[in-house]
Image (cartoon, rainbow, N blue to C red):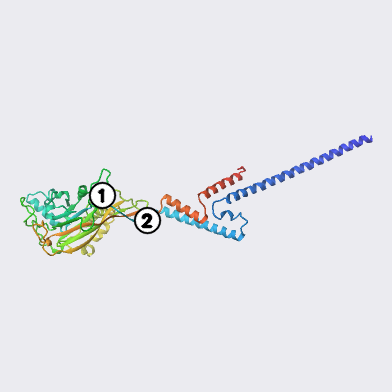
Amino acid sequence: MTTTLTKRTLAARLARLEKKLNIYDDQNDDEEEECVAEKEEEEKRRGLLDVLESHVSGFSADGLEYVWFDTSMPKWARVIVGTTFLTGFGLMFWLISQTVSDYQSHPFATSLMYEERANARWPAIIFCPKHPELSIGKMDKIEEDGLDPYSKNETFMKSMVRKCDFFGVKCDGSGEENITQYWAVKDLGERYGICLEFNQLDKVNDLYCPEDENGETHPTECMFGLYGNAYGLNVFLDPLLEYNSVDEDDPYTNATSLYDADHFDKRYNGMYVEIHGTTHEAVPAFNSISGAVGQATFISMSERETRRLGKPYHEKECIKDPSYSRSTCISKCQEDIHDKCEYDTSISLYDNLHGDTSKYHTCYNEEMTSEICQCDEPCLSDDFIPIASTTNVYNASTIEGLKPSTDLNDYANFHVYYNTINLEIIEEVPVYNFYVFIGVIFGHIGFFTGFNLITIMQIGVMFLHLFKRLVGMKF
């Protein structure tokens, strides 16, 4: 009996002990699970820091790797470096914003260059008498006498051109060449009358400075590499056209004047001279020089090419047509105003512009806003810059060929030449293009933070790594 109770007691005790052990095991399991969870959370948190530290400490940016993580540096040194870095970071963003703002405003700069050339093509030169009614009256008289008008024959050319040399070649028709190879008659209306144009439509360049099939000229085939006052165009002109005859057997010598110009004051006798590109219309009112009879006028010229930008660097798009000239547009504007506003030729310019009863000035200001007067700039313009000097001629001429008069006071002498054949180039260039814009921005970044392209790639990889850790993914 005793033995039986003892076994039962032992069994019960064992059951209780086993139960207690199970409870203890469950508690231990819970505690272990809590510990594991805490450790995993700690490891997760520590993992993010490790990722951040491992990436930042490897950045290719000077000083950044030890600002927060390198405890071997003194704290005060780390604070100074960190403050400098953050200040530079803010300044970097401000400069980048300024750069972006400048880039969007499309700034441009103007550069000045000189291009050396072995030769230079010759411009067109217009010669107009200062009295347009003189040349128009001459032409009318010729037609009245039954001859062809000036625009259809050589009468006007040989009446005005008394002697002409161009780089040693006769250009007045007295040599083997015909005068029409060099000169052309130009009717510029009542304002300038009948004028002569030298080298119209590249006549001279086609003779002595030809272009090949690619539109290029070669120094060995062009004689215009010579410059200085010993070369160029030297011409004696008769602006009064006094020596012209209706006698076809003796048309150019021993003649009497067909048009009486005696009433003109001598100080007005002379010529307008304007130099322009051969693709442009002649406009004597612009870039012109005035020469008088009895004077030798030396015109030293240089060539300037201007290359302009259009939109968005300017409000208006520039004109790409190579034959377009702003001076021609302005001249048409002035003529339009002259007609519409009824300029009174019987009173002075002052009275027209400022007279109490004159309405010209009011009309002028109104018409200046008209569409015809809104002249755009050409994208590419080729201008010839003249510098003139004059000297008086008093003695009689001993130059052969100046017939019928040997008195230089009857003629206006012009000597036109290149003072240099270097080409002056004025070009508008953008301050920023896309590549310069990117370079400036990355320059700010590199200077203030030490970042470069590799650093930016590392930052991208770091954020990707951190993102994967945050969503619970292993990297």
Q: Tell me the residue that label 1 is attached to.
A: 219
Q: Which amino acid does label 2 sit on?
A: Ala
| 20 displayed left or right of 130 | right
- Label at residue 109: 2
Location of residue 316 in the rendering, given as x and y in whole percent from the top left corner: 33, 52
Residue at image point 27% right, 59% down: 365
Q: Which mark is nearer the camera, 1 or 2?
A: 1
Is 167 in front, or is 326? 167
- SS for dot 1: helix
Q: Does residue 284 appear anywhere in the picture? A: no
Contact (CB < 8 A) between labels 1 and 2?
no
- Of residue 337 and residue 144, the one placed in the foreground of this image is 144
Query: Tag on residue 82?
Result: none
- The quarter of the rendered structure image containing the N terminus is top right
Residue at point 93%, 35% (across, down): 3
User: Quarter of the image holding residue 113?
Assistant: bottom left
The C terminus lies in quadrant: top right
Q: What element carries label 2?
A: strand
Q: Position of residue 233 (x, y in %)?
A: 19, 55
Q: Distance between the residues labelled 1 and 2?
A: 33 Å
Relative side of 10 to 162, left or right: right
How packed is label 1: few (under 14 Cα within 10 Å), some, or many (20 or more)?
Answer: few
In depth, the one of 242 and 341 nearer the eye is 242
Q: Position of residue 138 (x, y in %)?
A: 11, 54
Q: Is residue 433 above or below residue 474?
A: below
- Give the crowd class for mark 2: few <14, some 14-19, many >=20 residues within 10 Å: few
Between discs 1 and 2, the one toward the N terminus: 2
The quarter of the picture where residue 353 lies is: bottom left
In the displayed orientation, state which residue is furthest to the right: 1
**In this orientation, which residue lies closer to the viewer: 202 or 11?**
202
Q: How many numbered tags mark residues here?
A: 2
Type of the residue with mark 1:
Pro
